[in-house]
C-alpha cells in the first residue's frame, strides 16, 4: 500500500483556496478553516515528520477552536454612532432657530435652512418671525416661536 505524504505547502494551498472561497461566500467562516489549514502547514514545516492522521486531527481541532472563538469576538453595535442623525437630514435641524421665509398660514409655511427651503408646520406666524425646530416628520419640520 502506498503511504500518503502531505507536504506543508499542501496545507497552505488549502488555506489559500479556503481564503478565496471566503471572498465569494463572505460570512461563511471559511477564513477560519483557512487559518487552521495554514497553522497545520506551519506546524508541518517546523515538524516535518508529523504523521498524516495527526495533521488531520490538528486541522480538525484548530478549525473547531477557531470557529468557536469567533463567538467570543465582540460585534459592533449598529445603533451606536457618534452621528445618529447622519442619514436623517431633517432630524439634524432639531433645536436650530430659523427665520420664516413665508408666513405660517393654516399651520403650514416655509423657512430656509442654510440654502435649502424647507416646509414647516406650527402655529400661524408672519414671514420673518424666528422659530425653533422642535421635531422632524419626514421632510416637514415642526416649529414653535423662538
Image: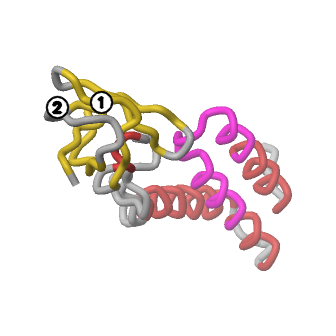
Q: In front: 146, or 91?
A: 146
37 relative to 113 in the view: left or right: right
Above or below residue 49? Residue 131 is above
The residue identified by callout 2 is 124
The secondary structure type at the circle numbered 1 is strand
Q: Residue at x 59, y 58 (%)?
A: 59
Badges 2 and 1: C-beta atoms under 8 Å apart? yes
- Regarding residue 139, the answer to whether it shows in the image is no
Q: In front: 28, or 146?
A: 146
- Regarding residue 128, the answer to whether it shows in the image is yes
Tell me the crowding category of disc 2: few under 14, some 14 to 19, or many 20 or more residues within 10 angstroms, Cα based.
some
Give, as a single range, the part of the protein colored magenta.
19-39
Quarter of the image that includes the N terminus: top right
Farthest residue to the bottom: give it: 46
Instruction: Estimate the x, y position of residue 22 in percent, counting from the top left.
Output: 65, 41
Instruction: Estimate the x, y position of residue 127 in percent, counting from the top left.
Output: 33, 35
Instruction: Estimate the x, y position of residue 75 in percent, counting from the top left.
Output: 40, 59
Instruction: Estimate the x, y position of residue 65 in percent, counting from the top left.
Output: 46, 63
The residue identified by callout 1 is 103
Residue 129 is a magenta residue: no
Q: In front: 15, or 2?
A: 15
58 relative to 4 in the view: left or right: left
Kindly report the secondary structure that dominates the magenta region of the rendered protein: helix
Q: Give the Cα distance between marks 2 and 1.
A: 7 Å
The secondary structure type at the circle numbered 2 is loop
N-terminal of the pair, mark 2 or mark 1, is: 1
Above or below residue 121? Residue 15 is below
| Residue 24 position by quadrant | top right
Amino acid at each position: 500500500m502506498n503511504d500518503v505524504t502531505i507536504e506543508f505547502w499542501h496545507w497552505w494551498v488549502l488555506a489559500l483556496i479556503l481564503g478565496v472561497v471566503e471572498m465569494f461566500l463572505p460570512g461563511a467562516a471559511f477564513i477560519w478553516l483557512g487559518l487552521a489549514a495554514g497553522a497545520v502547514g506551519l506546524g508541518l514545516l517546523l515538524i516535518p515528520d508529523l504523521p498524516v492522521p495527526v495533521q488531520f486531527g490538528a486541522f480538525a481541532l484548530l478549525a473547531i477552536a477557531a470557529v468557536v472563538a469567533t463567538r467570543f469576538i465582540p460585534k459592533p453595535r449598529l445603533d451606536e454612532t457618534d452621528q445618529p442623525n447622519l442619514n436623517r437630514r431633517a432630524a439634524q435641524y432639531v433645536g436650530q432657530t430659523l427665520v420664516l421665509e413665508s408666513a405660517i398660514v393654516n399651520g403650514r409655511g416655509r423657512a430656509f435652512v442654510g440654502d435649502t427651503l424647507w416646509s414647516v408646520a406650527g402655529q400661524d406666524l408672519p414671514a420673518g418671525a424666528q422659530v425653533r425646530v422642535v421635531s422632524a416628520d419626514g421632510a416637514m419640520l415642526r416649529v414653535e416661536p423662538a
